[in-house]
Amino acid sequence: MFEKLSDRLDQAIRTLKGQGRITENNVSETMKEIRRALLDADVGFKIAKEFTEEVKTKALGQDVIKSVSPGQLLIKIMNEELTRLMGKEASPLALKPNGTSVVLMSGLQGSGKTTFTGKLALLLKSQGKKVLMVACDVYRPAAVDQLKILGEQIGVPVYAEPDQKNPVLIATQAVKQAKTEGYSVVLVDTAGRLAVDEAMMNEISEIHASIQPDQTLFVVDAMTGQDAVNTAAAFNQRLNFDGVVLTKMDGDARGGAALTISYTVGKPIKYVSTGEKLQALDVFHPDRMANRILGMGDVVSLVEKAQQQINAEEAARLQKKISKNQFDLQDFYEQIQQIKKMGNMKDLLGMIPGVGKAIKDMDFSDEMFKQTEAIIQSMTPLERREPEILNGSRRERIARGSGTKVQEINQLLKQFGEMKQMMRKMNGGMPGGAMGQAMGRMRSPFGRS
């Protein structure tokens, strides 16, 4: 989402690189470019002006020491101000330590409330919570069915009353039942409208009053730009919600909503949804997002994602195999499956400092793994464990089975050998060597469809 903004900010800051010191003139010129970049990113003029004036004031008020260039100092100040603009620090979902917590979803139709409800349910379930989802959208066709399908996919029950058309009664009865049956979290999915209207606001207000949720979340499509900010303000006046959820952050929106919605309504962004997969939900960290916008990467989030997909026992097993040079194609295949669960490949690689700019024009998807997977699946268990036995006839058989060419088999084996050497030097790198393997895999174009 922030690719264009990152590029524009980088170009603006370059004007200070090579300068011996910060002056009124060179900072003013840089701030003009940064203000234009923010406006193009759909940041409101008032906020863009306040932001650049604050950065300029701080930049002129600091001396540049010999070991720090003016450009580096400006990046530091920009990082601090972007973090402040987006909410300063992460704000996790506040749930009761005991008893049943109720979370109410609000927002316009099409914002992604139902899908987010499923994603949040899966996240909470992975944390050991007993979760119940409640279908209160009685207007949108198949809304209840959609939530039930999500529930089946993640193994979370859904409370629904198909014959009941009063969402207030549905929500009230669901919460009552959840408390009786010992659920730790109840997620209430509500109906939206195409625009803010009085009927919609009255209904969501009645539901809110009847169930008295512990947390009320405003779910908004990040691709709607400043409209998202205006809608958030309208909902906050009626519900005084606890936090914002930004969906479709993997789209091509300009990013203005993510930058300013927290500052405008005075409420934190709690989660960001970054893809279609149900695992594609992250707690929002303003400081990490600021790092990514400024091209500094986000290694902490990358490590956390890797840790979520591989347990300590499996990590130790892989570490041992890597150190003994016993990592084989079966291990590689299994790690590909883990990497695919971590989210969008381009977003993952963009978390590595310096890599985001290098791959900005490249297209990545799960499709790129298919050829590699087909080749490995066409091997026997022995061939996966001992690829050195793959002679000419075996490679021809694998090529026929995978629909590839022998040259492509040869290329994969060569790259796998190079990757093993790199992994031994890294001694596994990140947890389980997962991302070390991913990067080794990504260093070449093999396997792209």
Image (cartoon, helix red, strand yellow):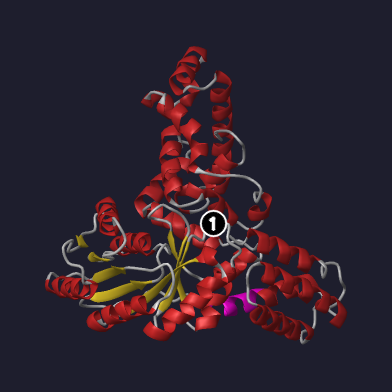
How many labels sit on residues? 1
The quarter of the picture where the C terminus appears is top right
Question: Residue 243 appears at what percent x and percent y?
Answer: 42, 77
Residue stretch rendered in magenta on the structure:
79-87
Residue 74 in the image: above or below residue 399: below
The front one of 196 and 147 is 196
Residue 352 in the image: above or below residue 420: below
Question: How many neighbours does mark 1 have within 10 angstroms: few (below 14), some (14-19), or many (20 or more)?
Answer: some
Question: Residue 238 appears at what percent x and percent y?
Answer: 39, 84
Q: Name the residue type under label 1.
A: Gly
- Residue 69 seen: no
Can you tell which quarter of the image residue 41 is in? bottom right
According to the picture, the residue beneath numbered tag 1 turns out to be 251
Residue 42 included in the magenta stretch of the image: no
In this rendering, would 213 be left or right of 393?
Answer: left
Element at label 1: loop
The front one of 255 and 283 is 255
What residue lies at 67% left-to-right and 78% top-to-bottom?
Answer: 45
What residue lies at 75% left-to-right and 86% top-to-bottom?
Answer: 57
- Residue 391 seen: yes
Can you tell which quarter of the image residue 335 is in? top left
Most distant residue in the top direction: 393
In this rendering, would 142 be left or right of 415?
Answer: left
The quarter of the picture where the N terminus appears is bottom right
**Main secondary structure found in the magenta portion:** helix
Question: Residue 87 appears at what percent x and percent y?
Answer: 53, 78
